[in-house]
Amino acid sequence: MITANIRELVKYRIEQAVESLEAAKILHEKQYERPSVNRAYYAMFYAVLALLATRKQETSKHSGAIALFDLEYAKPGILPKEFSKWLHEAFNLRQRSDYSPQFNLTADEVDRILRNASFFLAEVKELLATELA
């Protein structure tokens, strides 16, 4: 059963995801590629947290959330397996761009991550609409 508290948490996480994706697009327009990838990844991460909230699953670690997403949504085919690849790629690029010295991203890489994040978020929102109905 999905309680009112869970519905509010899901709504909050989706708001975070939408805001992060919008920030990623603005940063990319200004050619701030590293922070753009950071925000695009977080859009996907917050969407995953929204999904996990509907199953009353929480984790404080990014790797844990990604593993749960793979287990609960990608492997059973609830969402396309390709989404797992996109999530892992965004996480890895975010890690490298945030923590590796002198790591640069191309505009094409960022375009791809933004497209993937946009589609990922749209599909998660659609799935949540059916799960919360």
Image (cartoon, rainbow, N blue to C red):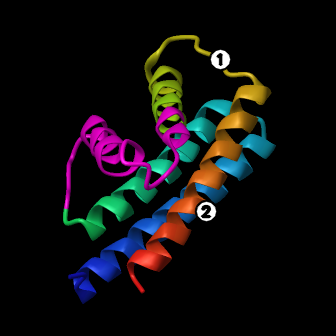
Residue identifier under label 1: 104
Label 2 to label 1: alpha-carbon separation? 28 Å
**Residue 14 located within the stretch drawn in magenta:** no
**Residue 62 located within the stretch drawn in magenta:** yes
Q: Which mark is residue 92?
A: none
Residue in view at x 55 percent, y 70 percent: 126
Residue in view at x 51 percent, y 32 percent: 85
- Left or right for 80, reference 5: right
In the depicted structure, whether residue 131 falls above or below residue 42: below
Q: Quadrant of the C terminus?
A: bottom left
Which of disc 1 and disc 2 is earlier in sequence? 1
Residue identifier under label 2: 122
Residue 97, x across and y down, in percent: 53, 24
Residue 27, x across and y down, in percent: 70, 45
Residue in view at x 65 percent, y 17 percent: 104
Mark 1, secondary structure of its residue: loop
In the depicted structure, whether residue 4 falls above or below residue 72: below
Callout 2, which amino acid? Ala
- Disc 2, disc 1: CB below 8 Å? no
Q: Quadrant of the N terminus?
A: bottom left
Callout 1, which amino acid? Asn
Furthest toward the top, the residue is 102
Residue in view at x 71 percent, y 35 percent: 112
Q: Which residues are magenta?
A: 57-85
Furthest toward the front, the residue is 76
Residue 23, x across and y down, in percent: 63, 54
In the depicted structure, whether residue 7 falls above or below residue 85: below
Q: Is residue 32 visible?
A: no
Q: Is residue 66 visible?
A: yes
Mark 2, secondary structure of its residue: helix
* Tally of numbered tags: 2
